[in-house]
Image (cartoon, rainbow, N blue to C red):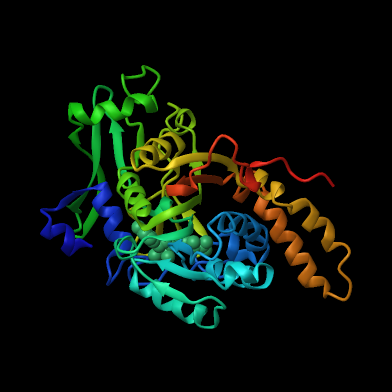
Amino acid sequence: MQQRLLAAGGSVDFRTYMEWVLHDPAWGAYGSGQLRVGPDGDFATSPSLGPEFSALLAPQIAQWLGQQPAEAPLALVETGPGEGTLALQLATALASGWPELAARTTLFLVEPNGGMAARQRQLLAGCPLPCRWLSFPELAAAPVRGVLLAHEVLDALAVERIMWDGTLWRRQAVVLHEGTDGQPSLRLEPGETLEPTALTPLEPLGLWPPNPQRPAGFTTELHPGLAPWLMEAAAALAAGQLLVIDYALEAWRYYAPQRCNGTLMAYRQQRATDDPLLDPGQWDLTAHLCLESLQSAAAAAGWHWIGQRRQGEALLALGLAQRLHDLQRVHGADLPDLLSRREALLRLVDPTTLGDFRWVAMATGAAKPSEASEPPSFLQDPPLG
Ligand SMILES: C[S@@+](CC[C@H](N)C(=O)[O-])C[C@H]1O[C@@H](n2cnc3c(N)ncnc32)[C@H](O)[C@@H]1O
């Protein structure tokens, strides 16, 4: 890190720093493949808690795949597959529950980090669907029909951090200093001021014109990586749905004057800190999505916005309560397994953690819904008991 910073003149904007610490192939958290996803790794995600999440999500994927023309080749694309757990669970669920769809489906994995892709290949060696690792531009050469999943990946796109100095917005910079003991250290400092053209996109977010309640030193994030990502994703899909599942907030919550330090967090070995400079490359860095920023970037990239819902409500709509109830009637299963499945189901809807994730659905190409289209299952009322 220090050598890269020195080569860059001793200071870079925060977005570049985040890109380096996550993706440097030698020492970046994902680039080197050192981060582990799961309860025994650096942080847990919904599918890493067991098969329950994918079992509930699979019918939604099948509903969308089933809307494609009969006999068309189908694609299930996962971007940012981590360990490959979600991809394997969904492929397995499709193969057993919807064999006709599965027989036409290829699993595509979009993973820029070689170290992560190597582990995915190992896990998916026994996958019941054919698997291919491609980039978005490679997919765009022959766009596919189907479903694109982005589960806990857009929160890893490098964010721009801006700081209100009481008069102006400034881009936050990461600066290399020499301490009094002669040891180099990193610091976050206010950098260049935002140019007038950069202020216009802040208006719909409530960040401009100035709000007198916003204290000097207020720091937050912007998401310039979303628009190019959504453009590349749209080009990869000839027709189909994108399901984004991630931490996300409405702009009025995200940029409330009280949220003085944004949403940026670092995770490692099941610990969390809001210091992004700690051991660069050893921690996962993530920032919440802003729903309005996502929606406007999606519209600019040609996506049709279908709707969004909290994970707790989405999973209830997909039958979580019934699944919980059915666990009581399983005979012959061992008690520890039943208890851990029950625990996983409850964690998935816990409103203080995973249940507060947002599920956001969009469509492109011929899959854009008409007025008469039925909404996807996860946006409908939960089934009555
Ligand atoms: C938190 S993990 C996702 C875990 C996985 N989706 C799951 O549900 O368990 C983030 C993954 O996204 C990958 N990633 C990071 N930036 C990415 C990008 N711009 N495009 C695609 N994948 C990316 C990482 O290498 C890693 O595989």
Residue ID at (47%, 81%): 122
Q: Position of residue 348 (x, y in %)?
A: 65, 54
Q: Is residue 280 in sight in this rendering?
A: no
From the top left corner, tell me how far across and down residue 377 is, in percent. Answer: 65, 47
Residue 65: give x, y in percent of width and height.
56, 58
Q: Is residue 184 left or right of residue 119?
A: left
Residue 75 higher or lower than 196, as above or below: below
Residue 275 against residue 202 in the figure, above or below: below
Query: Residue placed farthest to the front in the image?
Result: 70
The x, y position of residue 116, in whole percent, is 40, 72
> Where 283 falls versus 274 (above or below)?
below
Q: Is residue 373 left or right of residue 109?
A: right
- Where on the picture, by quarter, is residue 50? bottom right
Question: How many labels sit on residues?
Answer: 0
Residue at left offset 43%, top offset 26%: 257
Residue at x 71% of width, y 48% of height: 316
Can see residue 56? Answer: yes
Q: Relative to the observer, which residue lies in front, 190 or 73?
A: 73
Q: Which residue corresponds to the image point at 49% horizontal and 37% vertical from the top-left?
A: 249
The quadrant where residue 56 appears: bottom right
Which residue, as the protein is rendered here, is positioned at the far top?
A: 212
Q: Nearer the viewer, residue 263 or 138?
A: 138
- Locate the N terminus by quadrant: bottom left
Quadrant of ligand 1: it is bottom left
Is 227 in front, or is 260?
227
